[in-house]
Image: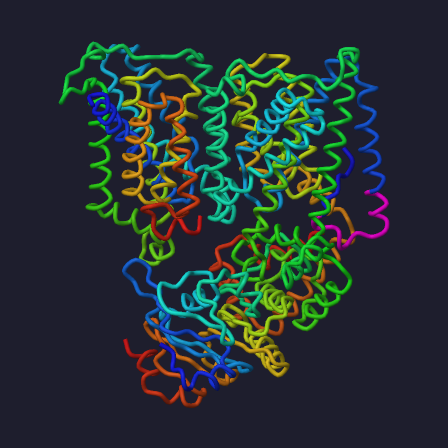
């Protein structure tokens, strides 16, 4: 994995050198992804690659709402499942070109996401999570029961977009590239939002929604847009998967577990980083496929998933990429210069203000109740490095 | 007519159980602003423990309450102290959802591992007994489950209204900062609030085990309706949750006549969406819900 | 409710004004029929003992809380119950009690949050255009923390966060700035710095409404003081008038 660049906090201080480094990293990453089908040992490995790319698309799409706004959706499987079913049903019933069908399905899900977003985003936090889970449960119910239209519990067979002359390994290869292309579009969109004013507003919502609103950010509209974009890409991911896999079963499409994969992947990689969900998808996706292959679909699968998610939430809520970036930064010279200024400023402030002011300052921090590090820790950290 | 009456009676009986469980869910949210996804997983765990207790000892499953209620209370306190309180306040609501979700997955997986995925049911001597009220057939076990729920809810109500601890609990729910200012140890109260919440899951699980079959992944069928109930009732309001539980439980039972059981379940979700559209703070909720 | 005859001249000088504003929490009436007018172009202060409803009043006025009764107007236009971002874009910026910044964003990113226009093209453009960065750097320099541009907001001191918050509010270019306890929890040197900033910004035409405990600061800074007690104004006027009013002494020392 190349250094994968936390664009959020480093854009400002990056020099020409680090831009070049990022460009090289991006090229290496692209080359690694594109050459995977030719180095994959057999069709099975290649199909695992497709699954992982599909997870990467879903996790990156999830991160439009999770990463930018901090609203955690546990039910994003609803949108991938709807995208898959809508694509399949469109192809079956209207005979539309499958790729066009996939796009239409994505748009339809995006339209559907508007009222859902309005219902769940008007109030803060908890309601959003509750709606996200409820949505998956209700869709599972509907798609299982409405057999005449969705195929019910028997599942739905989706016609393949490539003719029978395209053999299985080549199917995998084509779909691998298609997924990679969709991933690239999603990443590009995420990056564009990340650097925009809109993105700045979204990140402010994640940090402190009241404060953002007081600065003029139309928080509800922003959240809704991010949510709809997220649903759109998730649906495209679901549609593409449906065309590849060729079969949809409501139990797997509208599964709480699939939704939680997206969360775990993004969280593990780092929700504030462009490539965080991708990295998480590679790790978790590989692990999931490996365990399924080795031990089958056992209950341990659930336990492992639960434990891993719990551990990440408790001990690494910022994910791998920020943790790694911090580690790198600790050994990087230019970062300490910032620290030294802070330290000098603090020292000066203390000299002029005297001990009681410093104490009052301290008092104010503790009263605040937030986890702002005390000035002492800042100073000692600066001194250490 | 008797079918309607039958459904109404069933709705009331089911609503009672919903009310107790929703009260627990409300307690967690009230004291800690935590949406406790694992609540229904603990419910199923309690059902399994009751089943296991009966199959090991041959005693009545109701007696398992003597063990499970204190056990679950302790687990709740421990969970709040060891896990939930570690989370940063700024992201507590979101991260606690994930944490309790992961607990739910672990419980489901462990249950499947220990007892396999097959459906379980407790065989009781009085399992088939029923009697007739105004032409409606009422199974004795359902009535016992209902009575258990009502007695527990009443006990919870008295605890909240009459005891000093209850006052501290209510103060913590309504205004944690103010509660701290008047000397309430809100951290400890939150722990006990969690314990109480989990105790409702123990009682609910035993009541559930009396008359239904259960399997490890059943908890997903419970958490959805329960969450809908607490939103409709207004997050953080126990009476609101209880009323919403009765109303929605009866609604579900009545809709089963024309729609069948599966489609009737969607009633909860429709009520959830409608509430959020029309009155996002819920119908009985106070100040709490507005900000969450 | 409003007096029609005197309304016209009053409105020319009125900044934010409330009529009969009321907010209850359960059984407690935090703001009780408060009618207050703040003056445009002046430094207004809102003082009062703890729990007199100042912050609730403040939150009602800025749209964070919906009042139960009464109206809020800004420069003559009704803004009662409007969303906070609409009030912000009407030209009213605010700081928060105990200071709130975006902890895991850099100081510069904190500056770039403020929204002045929601035109689609502007929102989708890069947040770091040269003009905006220059403006941000200028304001950071003005409050004296330009050297911290790249630090995360959570890593700078509390006093610096207060300055950052003020600079961030200024980025939206508000006409009126409401400060909730600007001197709370900061050292005397910094209080002076903040006071000087308020004075110079006021000289440039910004209206201020300051909620404050620090009497010395209020009396030295403001043109117009409103004293709150039990959710409503009990007295208002110049600092000298207010200081000598017996009702104020009673409210502060009475109970």
Where C119 sits versus A169, above or below? below
> Residue A343, how many percent across, how many down?
67, 62
Q: Which residues are magenta?
A: A8-22
- Seen at 56% across and 18% down, the residue is A249
* Relative side of C124 to A219, left or right: right
Q: Is residue A94 left or right of residue A7?
A: left
Name the main secondary structure of what is drawn in magenta.
helix
Nearer the observer, B280 or C38: B280
Image quarter where the N terminus of chain C lies is bottom left
Q: Is residue B92 visible?
A: no
- Image quadrant assignment for residue B255: top left
Q: Position of residue A264 (x, y in %)?
A: 59, 32
Q: Left or right of A71: which side holds A25?
A: right
**Left or right of B143: which side holds B217?**
right
Q: List the single residue furthest toward the front.
A: A94
Compared with residue C165, is residue B121 higher up or lower down, i.e. above or below?
above
Residue A16 magenta-drawn?
yes
Task: Tell me which residue sits at (78%, 20%) in the image.
Answer: A173
In the image, residue B140 above or below residue C126: above
Percent x, y of residue B91: 52, 46
Quarter-wise, where is residue C173 in the image?
A: bottom right
- Residue A96 shows in this picture: yes
């Amino acid at each position: 994995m190349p250094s994968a660049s936390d664009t959020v906090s480093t854009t400002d201080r990056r020099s020409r050198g680090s831009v070049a480094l990022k460009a090289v990293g991006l090229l290496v990453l692209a080359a690694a992804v594109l050459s995977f089908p030719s180095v994959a040992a057999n069709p099975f490995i290649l199909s695992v690659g497709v699954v992982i790319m599909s997870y990467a698309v879903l996790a990156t799409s999830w991160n439009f709402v999770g990463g930018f706004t901090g609203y955690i959706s546990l039910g994003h499987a609803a949108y991938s499942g709807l995208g898959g079913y809508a694509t399949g049903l469109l192809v079956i019933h209207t005979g539309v070109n499958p790729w066009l069908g996939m796009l239409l399905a994505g748009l339809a899900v995006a339209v559907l996401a508007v009222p859902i977003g309005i219902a769940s985003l008007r109030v803060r936090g908890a309601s959003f999570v509750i709606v996200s889970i409820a949505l998956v449960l209700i869709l599972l119910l509907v798609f299982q029961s409405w057999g005449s239209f969705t195929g019910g519990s028997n599942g739905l067979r989706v016609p393949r977009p490539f003719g029978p002359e395209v053999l299985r390994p080549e199917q995998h290869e084509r779909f691998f590239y298609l997924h990679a292309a969709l991933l690239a579009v999603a990443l590009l969109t995420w990056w564009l939002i990340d650097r925009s004013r809109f993105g700045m507003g979204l990140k402010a919502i994640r940090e402190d929604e009241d404060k953002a609103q007081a600065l003029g950010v139309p928080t509800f509209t922003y959240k809704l847009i991010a949510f709809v974009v997220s649903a759109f890409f998730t649906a495209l991911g679901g549609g593409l998967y449906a065309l590849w896999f060729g079969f949809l079963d409501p139990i797997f499409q509208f599964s709480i577990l699939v939704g939680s994969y997206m969360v775990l992947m993004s969280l593990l990689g780092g929700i504030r980083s462009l490539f965080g969900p991708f990295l998480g998808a590679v790790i978790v996706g590989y692990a999931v496929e490996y365990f399924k292959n080795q031990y089958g679909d056992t209950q341990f699968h659930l336990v492992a998933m639960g434990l891993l998610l719990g551990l990440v939430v408790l001990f690494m809520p910022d994910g791998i990429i920020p943790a790694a970036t911090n580690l790198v930064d600790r050994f990087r010279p230019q970062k300490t210069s910032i620290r030294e200024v802070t330290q000098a400023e603090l020292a000066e402030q203390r000299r002029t203000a005297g001990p009681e002011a410093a104490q009052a300052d301290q008092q104010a921090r503790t009263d605040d109740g937030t986890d702002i590090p005390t000035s002492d820790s800042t100073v000692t950290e600066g001194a250490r490095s | 007519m008797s079918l309607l009456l039958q459904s109404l009676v069933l709705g009331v009986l089911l609503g009672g159980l919903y009310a107790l469980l929703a009260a627990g869910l409300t307690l967690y949210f009230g004291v800690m602003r935590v949406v406790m996804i694992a609540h229904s997983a603990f419910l199923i765990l309690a059902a399994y423990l009751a089943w296991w207790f009966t199959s090991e000892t041959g005693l009545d499953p109701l007696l398992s309450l003597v063990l499970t209620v204190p056990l679950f209370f302790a687990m709740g306190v421990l969970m709040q102290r060891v896990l939930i309180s570690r989370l940063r306040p700024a992201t507590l609501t979101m991260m606690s959802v994930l944490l309790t979700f992961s607990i739910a997955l672990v419980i489901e997986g462990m249950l499947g591992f220990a007892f396999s995925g097959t459906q379980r049911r407790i065989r009781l001597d009085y399992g088939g007994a029923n009697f007739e009220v105004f032409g409606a057939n009422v199974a004795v076990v359902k009535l016992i489950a209902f009575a258990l729920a009502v007695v527990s809810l009443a006990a919870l109500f008295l605890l909240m209204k009459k005891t000093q601890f209850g006052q501290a609990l209510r103060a913590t729910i309504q205004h944690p900062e103010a509660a701290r200012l008047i000397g309430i140890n809100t951290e400890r109260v939150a722990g006990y609030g969690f314990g109480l919440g989990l105790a409702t899951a123990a009682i609910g699980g035993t009541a559930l085990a009396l008359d239904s079959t259960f399997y490890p992944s059943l908890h997903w069928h419970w958490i959805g309706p329960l969450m809908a109930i607490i939103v409709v009732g207004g997050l953080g309001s126990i009476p609101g949750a209880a009323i919403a539980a009765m109303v929605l439980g009866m609604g579900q039972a009545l809709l089963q006549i024309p729609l069948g059981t599966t489609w009737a379940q969607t009633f909860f979700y429709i009520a959830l969406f409608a509430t959020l559209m029309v009155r996002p703070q819920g119908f009985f909720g106070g100040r709490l819900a507005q900000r969450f | 409710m409003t007096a029609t005859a005197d309304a016209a001249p009053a409105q020319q000088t009125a900044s934010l004004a409330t009529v009969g504003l009321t907010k209850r929490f359960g059984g407690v009436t935090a703001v009780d029929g408060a009618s207050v007018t703040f003056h445009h172009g002046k430094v207004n202060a809102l003082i009062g003992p703890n729990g007199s409803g100042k912050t609730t009043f403040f939150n009602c006025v800025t749209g964070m809380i919906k009042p139960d009764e009464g109206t809020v107007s800004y420069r003559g236009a009704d803004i009662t119950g409007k969303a906070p971002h609409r009030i912000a874009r009407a030209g009213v910026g605010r700081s928060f009690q105990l200071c709130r910044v975006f902890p895991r964003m850099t100081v510069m990113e904190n500056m770039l949050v403020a929204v002045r226009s929601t035109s689609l093209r502007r929102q989708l453009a890069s947040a770091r255009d040269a003009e905006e960065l220059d403006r941000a750097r200028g304001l950071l320099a003005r409050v004296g923390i330009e050297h911290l541009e790249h630090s995360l907001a959570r890593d700078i001191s509390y006093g610096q966060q207060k300055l950052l918050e003020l600079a961030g509010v200024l980025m939206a270019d508000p006409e009126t700035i409401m400060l909730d306890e600007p001197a709370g929890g900061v050292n005397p040197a910094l209080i002076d710095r903040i006071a000087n900033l308020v004075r110079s910004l006021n000289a440039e035409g910004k209206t201020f409404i300051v909620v404050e405990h620090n009497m010395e600061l209020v009396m030295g800074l403001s043109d117009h003081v409103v004293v709150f007690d039990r959710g409503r104004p009990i007295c208002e006027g110049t600092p000298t008038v207010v200081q000598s009013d017996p009702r104020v002494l009673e409210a502060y020392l009475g109970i």
